[in-house]
Amino acid sequence: MSSNEMTGMTTSSGEALQENRVPIWRLRKAAANYIALIPYLAFALFPFYIIAITSIKSKQEINNLGESPFWASGIAVENYTFLYTNTSFFEHWMVNTLIVTTVSTIISVTVGILAAYALARLKFRGVEMFGVAVFITYLVPQTLLFLPLVDVINLIDDFIPIRDTYWSLILTYPTFLIPFVTWLLMGYFRTIPVEVEECAYLDGCSRLGALFKVVLPMAIPGIICAILFSYTLSWNEFLYSLVFIQDEYAKTLSVGVFTELIRGDIYFWGSLMAACLLGTLPIVILYGFLMDYYTSGLTQGAIK
Amino acid sequence: MASIKLTNLWKHYGDVQAVRGINLDIGHNEFVALVGPSGCGKTTTLRMIAGLEDITGGEIEIGENVVNEVPPKDRDIAMVFQNYALYPHMSVYQNMSFGLKIRKTPKEEIDKRVQMAAEILNISELLERRPAQLSGGQRQRVAMGRAIVRDPVVFLFDEPLSNLDAKLRVQMRTEIKKIHQRVQTTVVYVTHDQVEAMTLADRIVVMNEGVIEQVGTPNEMYSSPKTHFVASFIGSPSMNFMNCQLAKTAGGLAVRLSDDLSLPVPEDRTARYAPYADKEMTFGIRPEHVTEKRPHANGAQQDIDANVNVLEPMGVDTMVFFNLGPTEICARAEPTSVSEVGETMGFTVSMDKMHLIDPSTGAVV
C-alpha cells in the first residue's frame, strides 16, 4: 500500500513539474493501449450485443430479411413475456438452476477447501501423487465421465428416487467441481506463509482452529475465486443436465432453453436470446459483488 | 518461567541428520543464544522446543514435564519468527490479543496486558493499524508484543533481527535486552550473528553440523574456545590461523611458522603443550592480540617485523593485513601508528593469548 502511495506521489509531483500538462507521448501511449484492446472487445462483446439486440426485436423484425441484424427499430418485450407465460423459465428452470448451482458450489468448495489444505500442508505418504491424481481426475472429459455416472444414478435411483430431479445434478456436479476447486485452492494455500499458521498453533489454536481463524481469512481471494468458477461451471453445465433430466419442470436453464425453445426445426429466436440474456445476469451480478474481494491481496504485511 | 532440558535430542529428515544427539540445560529466566552457520541445526532445535517439528529421538523437558508428545498449543511458549508472521487480516491490537482470546482470558485483562506491552514496545499509537501499514521495525515490535502479552513460560526467537537494516538491528538488540531485564522469562534465541549472541545472551551455545561444539558465557567463548570451529566463529574479525610445528628449543617450546620464523611459547604453557611437541599443529591468535609494536607488558610478548599488505581503517582501530610466514594474518593497530601499504611495520604478538589446535581432532589443546 505504501509503495502505491509512493508511486502516486511521484506521479503527481512529476506532473506538477510539468505544469499539469499531459505530455503528448503519454496520450499516444494511452491511445495505443485502448486501440490494442478493440479487437479483443469485438470478439468478447459482439455475441452479447447480438443476443441483447435480438431479444428486444419483435418476431416480424427478426424474420424480415430486409432489416439489418445489427440494429433494432424499436423495443419489444414480447420475447420476455413469452418466456414468462409459455415456458417454465422463471418458475422452474431458473429456480432449479439456482438451487443446483448453489448447493453443489457449497458442497464442492467445502470439500475442496479441506482437501486442498490437506494436500498443501499435511505431510503424509503419497501426498504428491494424490495431488497429481486430483489434477488428472479433472482432466477426464465429462463426455466420458457421464457414462459410468448414468449407472451410478440409476443404482441410487433404485433406493431413493433422484432421477429426473435436480438431486441427480447436485450429486454429480461435484465430481468435476471438487477436483477443480481442490487444484485451485491447493496452489493458493501454498502461497500462505506457513509461519503465520505455526504462530497460531503457538498462540493456542488447534489445526482446525488455525485453519478457520487464520488460514481461511487469508485465503479469501482464493476462495472467492473458487466460488466464482464453480458457480459459473455449474450454471453453464449442459451435458449431465441433458442426460439425467427429462421432466420439463425439473430442467435447468441451459437444457430447458435448448430443448423447449427449439422445437424440431423451429427456433424461437427472440425468446432464445431473451432467455440467454436473463440466464447470464445472475453470474454477472455475482462477479460484480465479489470482484473487489477477488482482486485484493490479503496476505500483504504478514511477513517481511 | 521454566527451565528447559534437552536430552540426547535427534532430528532426521530422511537420510539427513539435522540434529545429532544434543544435550542442553537451560535455567530459569536464562537467556541462551543458539548460534552457528546455516544448516547447523539451531533453528531445527528451536522448532523442536516449540513443538513445530517432531522429535526423532531423545527428550525435551519444559519445567518438570516431558513435552515430546505435547502439541505446540499446550506448551505455553511464544515465538518470534524471522519474518514476523503477523496475522495480516487483523489489527495490531487483534494480533497481540489473539493468543489471549483463544485462551479465553477476560476482556479487561487482555486490554490491560496489550496496553502494557504496547507501552513497553512504544507501539501504543499503532494498535488500530494493520500489519501492511507498518514498517519493518514496527512489525518486529508487534511480533514481540504478541509474545510478551502472552506471558509464556518460554520465549523463542528465531533470528528476529535478520530482516532489519544494520542500524535498526543494533537498536532492537538493545531493546530485546532491556525487555528481557524487565520481563523475566527463559529465552532461547537463535541467530547466525555472533555479535548478537555475545551481546544478548547469558550463555552461548555454538552449534555445528547438528552437534553442540561448546556451551559457555560470552567471555568464556571468546577467551577459551574449545574447538577450532568455535575459535573461528566467535570474534570479529575472526581469529588468525596458521599451520605450524611445535618445536622443542633449549628454553622450552616454540611455534615454528616457517624456516626463519619461530615464536616462543610462554613458560606457563610449556607443560600443557609438551605432549604435542614436534607435531604439526594450528596456531591461532586474535587480531587484537597482534598490535603495533608496544613496550612489553609481560615476558610472553614478542616483536616481529613484516610488510603491510592491506589497511582497513575502522575509526577506533585500523586492521592491518600482513604475511606471517606463508599465511596472511590480520592485526588490530592504533590508527596513528600504522605504516603505509608496502612498507615494513613492527608488530607485538601477545603469545600469552595464543591458542594451539590439534588439526587431527580440531580441539584447542
Image: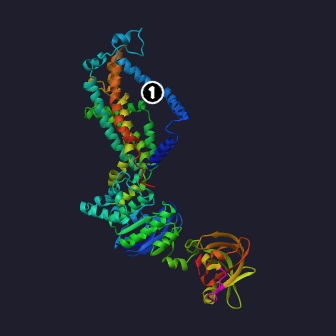
> Callout 1: few (<14), some (14-19), or many (20+) C-alpha neighbours within 10 Å?
few
For the point 40% across and 24% down, the residue is: A48
Report the residue marked by disc 1. Answer: A44
B303 displayed left or right of A152: right
Image quadrant containing the N terminus of chain B: bottom left
Instruction: Please state the horizontal and vertical placement of residue B107, each as a whole percent of the image.
Output: 24, 60
Instruction: Provide the residue span drawn in magenta.
Output: B292-301
- Residue found at the far front of this picture: A19
Instruction: Please state the horizontal and vertical placement of residue B169, each as a whole percent of the image.
Output: 48, 64
Image quadrant containing the C terminus of chain B: bottom right
For the point 44% across and 43% down, the residue is: A133
Using the rendered image of the protein, determine whether residue A86 is visible from the camera's viewpoint: yes
Q: Is residue B132 positioned above or below A287 on the image?
A: below
Q: Is residue A266 positioned above or below A156 on the image?
A: above
Of residue B133 and residue A125, the one placed in the foreground of this image is B133
Q: Is residue A117 positioned above or below A20 on the image?
A: below
Instruction: Please state the horizontal and vertical placement of residue B178, each as a whole percent of the image.
Output: 40, 71
B162 displayed left or right of B119: right
Location of residue B251 (image quadrant): bottom right
Magenta stretch mostly in which secondary structure? loop
Q: Is residue B294 magenta?
A: yes
Disc 1 residue type (three-letter): Ala
Of residue A277 and residue B338, the one placed in the foreground of this image is B338
